[in-house]
Image (cartoon, rainbow, N blue to C red):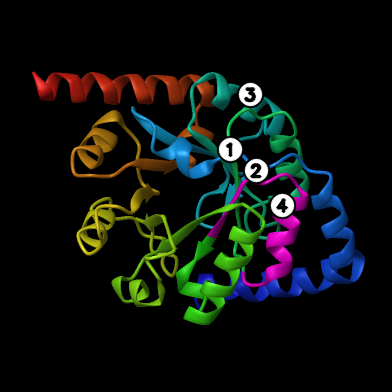
Amino acid sequence: MTILDRIVTDVNSALSHRKRRVSLQQLQDEIEIQVPPKDFHASLTKPGIRVIAEIKNRSPSKGVLRSDFSVLDLMISYTVASAAAISVLTEEQHFGGSLNHLRIASRDSSVPIIRKDFIVDPYQIYEARASGADAILLIAAILDKNQLDELHSLATELKMASLVEVYDPVELEKIDFSRIKILGVNNRNLHTFKVDLNHSLRIFELIDDHITKVAESGMKSGQDLAYLHQRGVDAFLIGETLMRSKQPGLALTLLIDETEKLLEEASN
């Protein structure tokens, strides 16, 4: 069993417990009192360097990422640093996340919030919207085509965006690009957790230009972002680099500034 297989097995187990505690009707009632979702896609396609800054407590490969973990402080610092959106990792057993983290981040956020988790069931999308999420992550590697279509359709019905993530080029065959606007490519192999920064570029070469392209994982410097941006990447999902910084918000500001400076120098 791979790391990814173990995570999905544990996610399904935890999901069955949550379903017994909170009914679907309860979630739907909570959704009714939520403010309308913010436009995640529009935020990723504005001019400039667009970063989805991630909030996560730990990772299976690196363990605890920071000792002074405060969702509220991280959300505020990322917002001040001009994050295009904020990703909140909610998987509990392997990443130390929770839906409560999502609620805290979304409560006062002025930028879109995406629930990052291993979503395999429509119930999780209702959870996300009931907890204030504006978008969800859908990982093609753990879904078949019908599941992907069903989950994407439900998110659309709830007026949420979907960031569809792939790793293997064969996963593109599951995607209906007439409906899906945003494609993320994970530079980290979810089976081995090894990183190849150029992996996203090889995948993006296979898709149409009208799709919004998000590179995920492995980016550590302005040079990394400038390199990818010059080759057509629209936005970047960055977690570990920021979470390991003493001041994640300042680290994001410096990263964006460095990237913009490098791009300006390259254009002169």
| Three-letter code, disc 4 | Arg
Crowd class of label 2 (few under 14; some 14 to 19; many from 20; radius 10 Å): some
Contact between labelled residues 1 and 2, with CB atoms less than 8 Å apart:
yes
Amino acid identity at mark 3: Ile
Which is more foreground, mark 2 or mark 1? 2
Circle 2 is placed at which residue position? Answer: 37
Q: Secondary structure at mark 1?
A: loop
The answer to which quarter of the image holds residue 137 is bottom right
Three-letter amino acid code at the position of disc 2: Pro
Disc sitting over residue 76 in the figure = 3
Magenta residues, start to end: 120-137
Mark 1 residue crowding within 10 angstroms, few (<14) / some (14–19) / many (20+)? many
Q: Could you tell whether 133 is left or right of 65 in the image?
A: right
Nearest the camera: 144 or 176?
176
Cα separation between marks 2 and 3: 19 Å
Q: Earlier in the sequence, mark 3 or mark 4?
A: 3
Disc number at residue 129?
A: 4
Q: Residue at x 39, y 57 (%)?
A: 183
